[in-house]
Image (spheres, grey):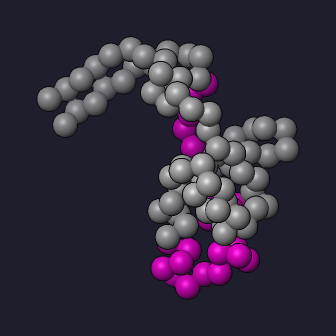
Amino acid sequence: MSLSSSRTVAALRPRPALAVEPSSSVAGAAARMREKNADAAIVVDAAGELLGIITDTDIARVLAEGGDPSVETVEVTMTASPRSAPPPNPTDIDITT
């Protein structure tokens, strides 16, 4: 089945994104994500520019590989330069299942 529609990004994710700094510890990011019930956080610099994204899977990988989440930084753990679209712009969505 294929579902195509034109929606805004804001309609897909109505709540504001959780943002963390690249210098934050993985443990600190995980605590903020838990507090906000979020499974991911965007990583932004001091000017608010998008640098990356950190997900609960990234955090689990740090633990599984024996890393110390209180020492490892978000910058080392994140996925850098994710593809994104600004919220006010429409985007075409094509979901195939």
Q: Quadrant of the N terminus?
A: top left
| Residue located at (71% from left, 76% from top) | 70
Whether residue 54 can be seen here: no
For this orientation, the residue located farthest to the left is 1
Within the image, what quadrant is residue 32 found in?
Answer: bottom right
Q: Is residue 78 magenta?
A: yes
Residue 82 in view: yes
Residue lying at the far right in this picture: please name it: 46
Q: Position of residue 60 (x, y in %)?
A: 49, 70
Residue 74: in magenta span: yes
Residue 33, above or below 81: below
Residue located 62% across and 33% down the image: 16
The residue most toward the front is: 35
Foreground residue, 34 or 7? 34
Q: Is residue 4 above or below residue 17?
A: above
Question: In the shown orientation, is residue 79 left or right of residue 12?
Answer: right
- Position of residue 34 in the picture relative to residue 64 (left or right): right
Compared with 27, 78 (above or below) is above
Q: Picture quarter containing residue 54?
A: bottom right
Q: Quadrant of the C terminus?
A: top left
Give the tally of numbered discs. 0
Q: Main secondary structure of the magenta part?
A: loop
Q: Residue at x 61, y 62 (%)?
A: 30
Q: Which residues are magenta?
A: 61-86
Question: x, y (%) of residue 93?
Answer: 36, 24
Q: Position of residue 51 (x, y in %)?
A: 69, 46
In the visual, does 90 lie left or right of 24?
left
